[in-house]
């Protein structure tokens, strides 16, 4: 059974009631407020989960306990950071939070060249055009090669996956965003269907899998239903970001869920066909009339539109 979810920046009772009113089952969030140490505190995580449970929501995904650049770049101090990461995983598992969404982007995270691109009816979306970056300086003072990132990922998985197995936490790798290499002179590796298969094969484990972010797989140029089937048949899709884009790297624009290049009916049918039974949330929705653009991709109205659209798709597929 697909569990529709929302990402919560605001943990107010009003937001949680709104989530229940649109029939959201699961909550996705980041670090609990007030928890500042290098290790995410067990009691704080436990209370955070209970805060959502009291509102009728299951806190099923953390996005994300950061994997530091010392880990990703193989720098001195990475073993200390890995120890902190592993203890945070243990605390997650003890608190009953089963999925960690993380990524392998180093130096900087997800990147866009605009957050004010005009979409349908004047709604604002984000976009990426690599040509705009061609004259810019590199983002890091030394070369970051793909080989270096694969080596550090292998080191990470060998240290962390056994802890995740013991803790009962599934590690769900998110694609690089944008999924191309390099970006601003920095290498990226989570950029293709083949590279995600390589991730899975590096450390075969029921706890080593992926966040299937449709927008990123679409901007890679992947066949979305085929990719869902490929990874779903291996039970490797732990968490889904349901979204769409127009175009592929090196130039694309985000869209409303019903206004992109991809067949969203076929995508939802593919999830049903593989028996996906995890959390699925809308991601990177447009900023709509009457809203500020303070948190591009995460304002309210676009997410409400997306959830309604997703629920309609699921019901239609199930009826068929």
Image (cartoon, rainbow, N blue to C red):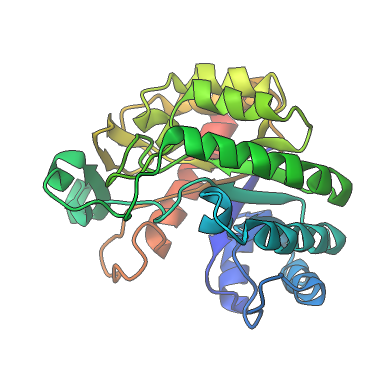
Q: Name the residue at 45% across, 26% down.
A: 192
Whole-percent x, y for residue 278 in the image: 70, 40
Whole-percent x, y for residue 28 in the image: 62, 58
Question: Image check: 41 left or right of 250?
Answer: right
Whole-percent x, y for residue 128 in the image: 24, 44
Vertical placement of residue 122 versus 39, above or below:
above
Residues 295 and 34: in front is 34
Figure quadrant of residue 205? top right
Question: Image check: 132 left or right of 230?
Answer: left
| Figure label count | 0
Which residue in the rendered view is the most extreme toward the bottom? 34
Quadrant that contains the C terminus: top right
Quadrant that contains the N terminus: top right
Which residue in the rendered view is the most extreme toward the front? 76
Vertical placement of residue 289 versus 275, above or below:
below
Q: Name the residue at 39% across, 60% down.
A: 301
* Residue 319 visible in image: no
Figure quadrant of residue 63? bottom right
Q: Name the residue at 59% across, 58% down.
A: 64
* Residue 128 visible in image: yes
Whole-percent x, y for residue 106 in the image: 45, 51
Q: Name the residue at 41% across, 38% down.
A: 188
Residues 260 and 132: in front is 132
Figure quadrant of residue 6? bottom right
Vertical placement of residue 204 versus 141, above or below:
above
Vertical placement of residue 138 versus 229, above or below:
below
């Amino acid at each position: 059974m697909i569990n529709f979810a929302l990402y919560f920046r605001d943990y107010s009772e009003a937001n949680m009631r709104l989530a229940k009113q649109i029939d959201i089952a699961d909550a996705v969030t980041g670090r609990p407020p007030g928890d500042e140490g290098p290790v995410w505190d067990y009691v704080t995580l436990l209370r955070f989960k209970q805060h959502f449970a009291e509102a009728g929501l299951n806190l099923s995904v953390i996005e994300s306990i950061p994997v530091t650049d010392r880990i990703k770049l193989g720098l001195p101090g990475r073993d200390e950071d890995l120890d902190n990461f592993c203890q945070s995983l243990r605390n997650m598992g003890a608190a009953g939070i089963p999925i960690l969404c993380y990524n392998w982007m180093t130096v900087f995270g997800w990147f866009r060249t605009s957050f004010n691109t005009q979409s349908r009816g004047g709604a604002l979306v984000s976009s990426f055009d690599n040509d705009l970056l061609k004259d810019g300086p590199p983002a890091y003072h030394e070369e970051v090669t793909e080989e270096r990132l694969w080596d550090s990922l292998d080191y990470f998985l060998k240290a962390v996956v056994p802890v995740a197995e013991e803790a009962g936490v599934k590690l769900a790798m998110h694609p690089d965003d944008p999924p191309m290499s390099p970006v601003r002179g920095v290498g990226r590796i989570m950029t293709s269907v083949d590279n995600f298969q390589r991730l899975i094969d590096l450390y075969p484990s029921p706890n080593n899998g992926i966040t299937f972010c449709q927008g990123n797989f679409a901007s890679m140029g992947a066949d979305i239903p085929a990719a869902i089937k490929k990874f779903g048949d291996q039970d490797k899709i732990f968490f889904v970001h349901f979204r769409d884009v127009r175009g592929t790297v090196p130039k694309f624009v985000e869209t409303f869920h019903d206004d992109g290049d991809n067949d969203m009916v076929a995508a939802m049918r593919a999830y049903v066909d593989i028996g996906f039974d995890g959390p699925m949330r809308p991601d990177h929705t447009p900023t709509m009339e009457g809203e500020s653009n303070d948190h591009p991709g995460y304002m309210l109205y676009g997410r409400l539109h997306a959830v309604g659209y997703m629920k309609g798709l699921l019901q239609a597929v199930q009826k068929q």
